[in-house]
Amino acid sequence: MNYLLIIKFIGAMFQFEGLFMLIPFTVGLIYHETQAKYLLLMAAVAFVIGSLLRLIQPKSKKFHSKEGFVVTAFSWIVMSVMGAMPFWISGEINSFTDAVFETASGFTTTGASILVDLEAMCKCMLFWRSFTHWIGGMGVLVFMLIFLKSSADEMNLMRAESPGPSVDKLVPKVRTTAFILYAIYTGITAISIIAFIAAGMPVFDSFCIGFGAAGTGGFGVKADSCASYSPLCQVLITISMFLFGVNFKIYFLIIIKKFKEILKCEEVLWYTIIYIVASTLVAVNIFTEIGAVGESVRASCFQVASIMTTTGFATHDFNLWSSLPKAILVLIMFTGACAGSTGGGIKVSRWILYLKQIKREVAKYTHPRSVKKIRLDGEVVDENTIRSANVYLMAYAAVFIVSMLVICIDGYDLITCFTSVAATLNNIGPGLEVVGPIGNYAGYSILSKWVFVFDMIAGRLELFPVLIMFAPQTWKRK
């Protein structure tokens, strides 16, 4: 284990986080808020700590897969703790545990909250809260790779932080791939924010909602999430959420005009089909409750996009809907968005692989001697990728079960406990009952909140970068 190189990378993360805090500090200056000084203070502290850690000169700059996983997990944990400090020391969030919960929820783009009176918070802190979504959406280490000059194996860092059963470079160089991803990410974010402003949404709200839609987070700036925005704004938010749930490779293929390659992408096709089918079923079932076709369709499309992309915004209290639409929403919690997007969940590509494996096993019973390869997007999927997807599902189930057993200690009903774990592990935010769209996680015990923090970070990093930290062999020196 190359400890010194890990510490040096964490130092770089501190520096970047310090620089990021200057943006909400500027917002505080614009609105003449005294709480902005805490953002400046913690920005300075983070940058100084990071600069001191960057002075370390490791003998070897080689990064193996193990170091990539460890530095990624540590960076996200430390980033969440440091990012929580402005909330805590300013008194905007009185409990340290709650501050870490809120910040981890932001960086992991979960959107689960402990805040009861959201609109009482100052704008600079609301901006920092929403900006954490944008920072965490594409991945902070991926962003760092654009600027850091290192001889480390950058692909191990990108692989540890990027979602999906497999991670590929768009171009031969990892740093160039990172730049392209962030250029696309920033461009679509800017277009979304401009569209929200043009539709009549307040400028401050447009930025915060834009960050939430881009990172598929879910932190709003109003107690009713997105319910009070105009129908046009809600439609634009729906489109934005859906687009950020698409594999970013598709946008790169559009840019380089390889349209035939786009047609081969099975995951995006099934992502779209699942979205349309789920939206239609929900719209039909909530029509009798809402009473208008247009509003039923808009509410359904918005909420399905929000849950499937793991964003977590809401325009209606879907807790009040009948059992079938709620069941559909719970099911698509586990579907998730596309690999290579900013969305969470298990991912559509993994479900495609699972279904194709079932089909292959059934075929083997009827034709025992047949040798059939699993293909995705027209290419053969190697057995390592299939094994990785299968192991991921087993690890996911294990973490889910253990988390739920611990959460049940607090005594909430089974639906609340089940959906709260599903909503945090899949980085969605709202669940059902107590943690529904108009509820929050404030009533949970300190132990449960730390379990949720673990689930949010583990879910965002797809489990193994966090789980590997608990393996004794990880820490053995060579």
Image (cartoon, helix red, strand yellow):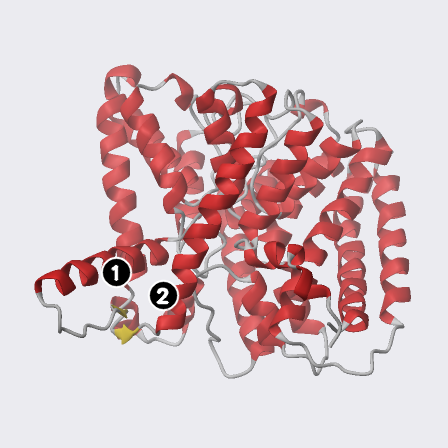
Residue 414 location (% of width, % of height): 46, 22
Q: Do the residues labelled 2 and 1 touch (CB within 8 Å)?
A: yes
Q: Nearer the viewer, residue 464 or 380?
A: 464
In the image, 403: left or right of 81? left
Task: Say what amino acid the circle numbered 2 marks.
Answer: Ile
How many residues crowd around disc 2 within 10 Å: few (fewer than 14), some, or many (20 or more)?
A: some
Q: Can I make out residue 312 in this image? A: no
| Mark pair 2, 1: CA separation | 9 Å
Which comes sooner in the sequence, label 2 or label 1? 1
Mark 1 — residue? 357
Task: Say what amino acid the circle numbered 1 marks.
Answer: Gln
The answer to whether 468 is drawn above or below residue 124 in the figure is below
Q: Which of 196 and 34 is in front in this view?
A: 34
Q: Residue furthest left?
A: 366
Residue 478 location (% of width, % of height): 73, 77
Q: Residue at x 43, y 51 (%)?
A: 394
Considering the numbered disc 2 on the image, is that residue within a helix, a strand or a loop? Answer: helix
